Amino acid sequence: MKVEREIAGFSLPFAAGTAVSAYLAESSYELCICCSTPALMLVLGMTAILSGQGSVNCTRDLQKLITALLGFFLGTFCSLTAEMADLSVHIPMLAQKAERLGIAMQEACDAVPYESKSTNAILKALITGERNDIPSSVTRTFRESGASHILALSGLHLGIIYMIISRMLSVAGKHRTAILTRSAITTCTCIIYTFATGAGPSISRALLFIILNETASVSERHRSSATIFLSALLIQLSLSPLSIRSVGFQLSYAAMAGIVFIYPSLRKLWPGNGLNGKASPVRRIWDSAALSISCQITTGPLAYIHFESFPVHFILTNLIAMPIIGILIPSAVAVTLLNVAGSCPDILIRFTEDMVKALTFSLSVISGM
């Protein structure tokens, strides 16, 4: 817990400073500069003086306060710098290749011979994030049932892709070389997929989680969900400070905050672990419900602020939709790849389409409640 507290003591104030600056600079940019500059100079001066005095005259609480203030004002300046000039690094060749790959993925999804083009459109959204071809009635069904996050390419989708690749490569064994190779292939594939699908704030957050988790795993260093969450927040805001204005960024990190900090406590409310230490079906349902509740506790207020709506049936929606999505995305990826190779069995195509129909039917029933 000490590592988590130390990271939180800097990353959370950094995020707060970034947010304050990003929003205030739109209306009062000069005021932000005037207020932040002397404050940052004061904090840096205090840090230099106290570091020279040693730990005798500097209490631990004061050190924490200085760290928090330094994080806040560095976040402010990081955001202001991004506001003054576009510091994003553009690599035309890489961007063009990623765009071409994304287009090729969309065309591959469209080429699968499903009976309904609506199926192609839904699966293209699930795999590539392109939602323009989805019928408005389907979009409305997802929105009214509280399942809009399923169509928006996010950490959920990259997480499933990551799981697919990891399990496919698990046959390589547990030797050190096999672990390093598997980690490198998995990470590189996720990076390529992220850039090919546009590298939005939510999926970029998931990519950072994967990179940090794999790095800690292969280097055999301390890792925890809280450490990865706080580190990813700090890194992403350092690289792209103004992304904190993005609704997708806010909802993504809010959802992960619920999973990391609330879900473990809610999950423990269920008495026992079932027979012989194995989770019973009822326990698994509770775990899924606890996960949904944890996410809604942190994302609900944000969703209401931005969209003036709240998904009333979110528990029922997630209990039904998430298991289907867990099967549907791997199946859709397999169908798309096999179809490109020219050897996709019709039974797999029909199964995937039936799963899409089951998903849309379930959500339409929920939206009508």
Image (tube, rainbow, N blue to C red):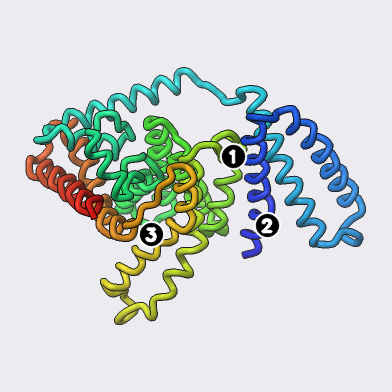
Which x, y percent locates residue 77?
71, 35
Which x, y percent locates residue 4?
62, 59
Measuring 39% from the left and 26% from the top, which residue is drawn there? 98
**Quarter holding residue 154:** top left
Task: Categorize mark 2 by other alpha carbons within 10 Å: few (<14), some (14-19), many (20+).
Answer: few
User: Which amino acid type is marked by label 3?
Assistant: Ser
Label of residue 6 in the image: 2
* Cα–Cα gap, marks 3 and 2: 29 Å
Does residue 169 appear anywhere in the picture?
no
Which image quadrant: the N terminus? bottom right
**Quarter holding residue 104:** top left
Does residue 81 appear anywhere in the picture?
yes
Which x, y percent locates residue 135?
22, 33
* Cα–Cα gap, marks 2 and 1: 18 Å
- Indicate left or right for 94 with 56 as reference: left
Residue at numbered disc 1: 237
Which x, y percent locates residue 326?
27, 52
Which image quadrant: the C terminus? bottom left
Task: Categorize mark 3 by other alpha carbons within 10 Å: few (<14), some (14-19), many (20+).
Answer: many
Measuring 49% from the left and 55% from the top, which residue is drawn there? 298
Find numbered disc 3 in the image and state the secondary structure of the residue it sits on: helix
User: Which amino acid type is marked by label 2?
Assistant: Glu
Measuring 31% from the left and 41% from the top, which residue is drawn there? 151
Disc 2 or 1, which lies upstream in sequence? Answer: 2
Residue at numbered disc 3: 292
**Quarter holding residue 320:** bottom left
Disc 3 or 1, which lies upstream in sequence? Answer: 1
Task: Categorize mark 1 by other alpha carbons within 10 Å: few (<14), some (14-19), many (20+).
Answer: many
User: Which amino acid type is marked by label 1?
Assistant: Leu
